[in-house]
Image (spheres, grey):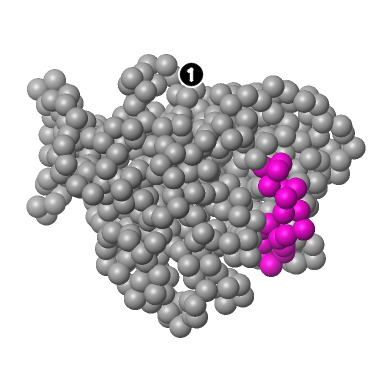
């Protein structure tokens, strides 16, 4: 392993390498784990608990239904829901049926859904009914011929019926929709339980997940993650956690499982301990989130900077007993030092930060859990992972020299689905070119100096200026548009839009309303500034860098 100076500072018991071929495929690991811990509680949601054995049985039924409906191995299925008990059942069921999972943010607009579903050739979808009205608008433009709908409370018994009543009748959170032949989740489980599963080829290099990422170009791409990729990252995180967690622990999962961080860390690595995961459906409801701490002795949680900051400032959270808390893991976006320091002051536990990207399944580096976590650092490359700093002159950077972070390891994706040119740009000679600028300190800890030049991080979600600019350009009163990220105390960054009017009657409110119709909430510009012209290169390319500099100067 090149430049592996970090190995000297690995926590005791963490090996230099893992065996990514320990399991032939991810399903082998999942099936073994579900049976090994069959009598233990695997997941809790809204107070309803489900054992590993129940998840195993129900996912068998779900797999049976998928095969019964004619879906074949390697067909694509979209999973579009917040954290619910239905998610692991649908996920493991789809894996057992040999399908490729396409994780989908339920907050996507119809335009965003259509792109992802057509790009991946999705044939089936499991969707929370709260978002089905958006699917109705675009389903005719896709290859989807099986829709399995579910309600938030569908698996929660009588309590679930009350939750559904409140959501539908009182809060009006379920817009009317009409999708022909859609079946309920429970119907799928009931009918599928009668079906005998058929086997299929499932080797290490087989793609089992399309995890979408915008990439620096803003063109949404499906990162093809293989069995070996996901097995490797699960094992890498398991040995990194080491004895930090135990089988009787309760782990809080406020991050959505459709996000690759929670998918790999919460759902897979933590499941390997036999620990119970509390699935949080709405992490913005801080009172209920704090209630989970009161109800369960939480041993660990994952989150993003904005969540940790919100909890730090929640009066009831600060009063809690944190004697059982062992670990807090931050990802998705940089953890701000004041937030990390306040978190440790309140809880007595260090906030451990790591670094990853969708294309690496996702974890690349992490701070240790042995008390040596370093503020402002993304930690050290995890087991079986090489990281190098590539300078602009094509030479590998020495200690404290700045360059692009490049990664090699068994967790690096196979490539982008149906995008060989984009794949060739991103993976060169086996190295994943992250586009992130960083350095390595002399003891092997790494720091990020700058991010992909134009990408914006809003509460841990990637926002790509090209996408927003393309939407805004579709407004008849806009001549030109450019988007940058500006610092924001609450979300880390927020989106700022610069626009040149084609019609003087255009207003800020009109433009933001137009964006809301076409973009997920976190992508909608919060600030609009009209200009007479935008700065450009001599070939006409808009200079976002100049706009960023102007914004900083105020």
For the C terminus, which image quadrant? Answer: bottom left
Residue 531 visible in image? no
In this image, 492 relative to 165: left or right? left
**Which residue does the numbered mark 1 point to in the structure image?**
418
Considering depth in this image, is 355 or 272 the residue closer to the camera? 272
Work out which residue is located at the far top of the displayed protein and give it: 420
For the N terminus, give its image quadrant.
top left
* Residue at figure coordinates x 73%, y 31% from the top left: 97
Judging depth in this view, the residue of 347 and 318 nearest the camera is 347
- Position of residue 61 relative to residue 459, above or below, is above
SS class of the residue under badge 1? loop
Q: What is the x, y in percent for residue 107?
A: 52, 47
Q: Is residue 131 left or right of residue 47?
A: left
Query: Residue at image x 59%, y 65%?
Result: 249
Crowding around mark 1 (Cα neighbors within 10 Å: few <14, some 14 to 19, many 20+) is: some
Q: Is residue 93 visible?
A: yes
Quarter of the image where one finds residue 273: bottom right
Q: Indicate the position of residue 94 as horizontal and vertical percent values.
A: 69, 35
Residue in front for this viewpoint, 216 or 252: 252
Q: Which residues are magenta?
A: 30-50
Position of residue 529 relative to residue 206, above or below, is: below
On the image, the x and y values in percent for residue 405 come to 27, 36
Residue 35 in the magenta stretch? The answer is yes
Which residue is most to the right? 194
Q: At 80% across and 35% down in the image, what residue appears?
A: 65
Residue 170 on image: x %, y %: 66, 65
| Apparent side of residue 490 relative to residue 222 in the rendered image (left or right) | left
């Amino acid at each position: 392993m090149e430049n592996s100076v970090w190995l000297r500072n690995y926590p005791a018991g963490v090996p230099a390498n893992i065996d990514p071929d320990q399991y032939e495929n991810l399903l082998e690991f999942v099936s073994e784990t579900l049976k090994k811990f069959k009598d233990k509680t695997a997941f809790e949601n809204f107070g309803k608990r489900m054992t590993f054995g129940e998840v195993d049985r129900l996912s068998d039924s779900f797999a049976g239904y998928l095969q019964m409906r004619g879906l074949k191995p390697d067909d694509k299925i979209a999973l579009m829901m917040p954290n619910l008990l239905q998610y692991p059942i649908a996920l493991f069921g789809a894996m057992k049926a040999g399908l490729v999972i396409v994780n989908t943010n339920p907050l996507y607009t119809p335009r965003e859904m259509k792109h992802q579903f057509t790009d991946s050739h999705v044939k089936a979808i499991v969707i929370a009914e709260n978002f089905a009205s958006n699917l109705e608008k675009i389903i005719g433009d896709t290859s989807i011929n099986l829709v399995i709908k579910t309600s938030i409370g569908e698996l929660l018994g009588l309590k679930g019926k009350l939750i559904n009543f409140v959501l539908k009748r009182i809060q009006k959170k379920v817009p009317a929709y009409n999708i022909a032949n859609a079946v309920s989740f429970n119907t799928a489980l009931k009918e599928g339980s009668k079906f005998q599963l058929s086997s299929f080829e499932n080797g290490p290099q087989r793609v089992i997940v399309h995890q979408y990422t915008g990439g620096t170009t803003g063109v949404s791409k499906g990162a093809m993650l293989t069995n070996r990729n996901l097995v490797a990252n699960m094992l890498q995180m398991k040995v990194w956690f080491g004895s930090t967690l135990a089988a009787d622990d309760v782990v809080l999962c406020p991050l959505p499982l459709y996000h690759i961080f929670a998918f790999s860390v919460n759902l897979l690595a933590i499941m390997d301990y036999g620990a119970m995961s509390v699935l949080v459906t709405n992490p913005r409801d801080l009172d209920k989130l704090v209630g989970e701490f009161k109800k369960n002795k939480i041993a660990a949680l994952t989150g993003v900077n904005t969540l940790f900051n919100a909890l730090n400032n929640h009066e009831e959270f600060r009063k809690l007993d944190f004697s059982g808390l062992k670990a807090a893991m931050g990802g998705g976006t940089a953890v701000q030092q004041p937030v990390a320091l306040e978190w440790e002051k309140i809880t007595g536990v260090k906030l451990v930060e790591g670094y990853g990207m969708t294309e690496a399944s996702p974890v690349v580096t992490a701070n240790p859990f042995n008390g040596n976590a370093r503020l402002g650092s993304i930690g050290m490359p995890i087991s079986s992972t090489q990281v190098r700093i590539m300078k602009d002159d094509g030479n590998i950077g020495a200690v404290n020299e700045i360059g692009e972070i490049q990664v090699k390891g068994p967790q690096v994706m196979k490539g982008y689905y149906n995008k060989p040119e984009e794949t060739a740009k991103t993976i060169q000679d086996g190295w994943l070119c992250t586009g992130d600028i960083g350095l390595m300190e002399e003891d092997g800890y790494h720091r990020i100096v700058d991010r992909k030049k134009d990408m914006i991080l809003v509460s841990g979600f990637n926002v790509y200026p090209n996408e927003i600019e393309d939407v805004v350009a579709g407004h008849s009163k806009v001549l030109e548009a450019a988007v940058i990220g500006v610092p924001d105390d609450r979300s880390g960054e927020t989106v700022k839009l610069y626009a040149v009017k084609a019609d003087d009657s255009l207003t800020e409110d009109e433009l933001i309303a137009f964006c809301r119709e076409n973009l997920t909430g976190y992508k909608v510009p919060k600030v609009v500034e009209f200009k007479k012209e935008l700065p450009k290169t001599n070939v006409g390319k808009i200079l976002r860098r100049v706009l960023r500099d102007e914004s900083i100067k105020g």
